[in-house]
Image: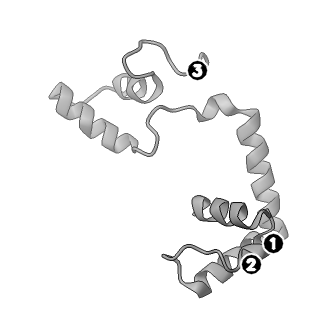
Amino acid sequence: MWEARDKAAKITGSQYPMTWMDYGPVWVRRDYWESLYHRWATGPWQERSQVAKRNRAAHSEKNVHTSGSVSYATHGQKLRHELERAPTFRELFDRTHKRKGMDDYVNENT
């Protein structure tokens, strides 16, 4: 849904949700899209959004993973297949926090 909001904001050139009315994704029913952008325009949602944005910016090192959209469960299954045994927590952690082909972590605090 983040991509849908971002695309609507880029198309309209506005960060104000009420201007996104006609730019919902084709896979979302019109009435659902309307209820979403009305919700996004509310004060409490905007406040939570700004707090989350500040937190992500202030603690960027906490948000660094190399797994992208692949879940830990999927990484665990792949490692189980590669190792032919259940991976340890450390092996799974290293898989999701180290650069591919390198032995260093993506962040020194990791």
The answer to whether mark 1 and mark 2 are in CB contact below 8 A is yes
Characterize the local packing of mark 1: few (<14), some (14-19) or many (20 or more) Cα atoms within 10 angstroms: few
Q: Amino acid at mark 2?
A: His
Q: Quadrant of the C terminus?
A: top right
Q: How is the image coloured?
A: one colour
**Mark positioned earlier in the residue sequence (1 or 3):** 1
How far apart marks 1 and 2 lie (CA) works out to 7 Å
Q: Amino acid at mark 1?
A: Thr
Task: Please tell me which residue is depicted at 69% across the width and 65% down the height of the picture.
Answer: 11
The answer to whether mark 1 and mark 3 are in CB contact below 8 A is no
Which residue is situated farthest in the left direction here?
84
Give the residue pinned by disc 2. Answer: 38
**Mark positioned earlier in the residue sequence (2 or 3):** 2
Q: Which quarter of the picture shows residue 21? A: bottom right
Q: Is residue 77 left or right of residue 44?
A: left
Q: Quadrant of the N terminus?
A: bottom right
Give the residue pinned by disc 1. Answer: 42
How far apart marks 1 and 3 lie (CA) works out to 36 Å
Q: Amino acid at mark 3?
A: Asn
**Kind of element beneath mark 1:** loop
Q: Which quarter of the picture shows residue 81? A: top left
Q: Give the percent coordinates (x, y) of residue 48.
A: 77, 57
Q: Is residue 92 left or right of residue 59?
A: left
Task: Please tell me which residue is depicted at 58% across the width and 20% down the height of the picture.
Answer: 107
Q: Give the percent coordinates (x, y) of residue 30.
A: 59, 85
**Kind of element beneath mark 2:** helix
Give the residue pinned by disc 3. Answer: 107
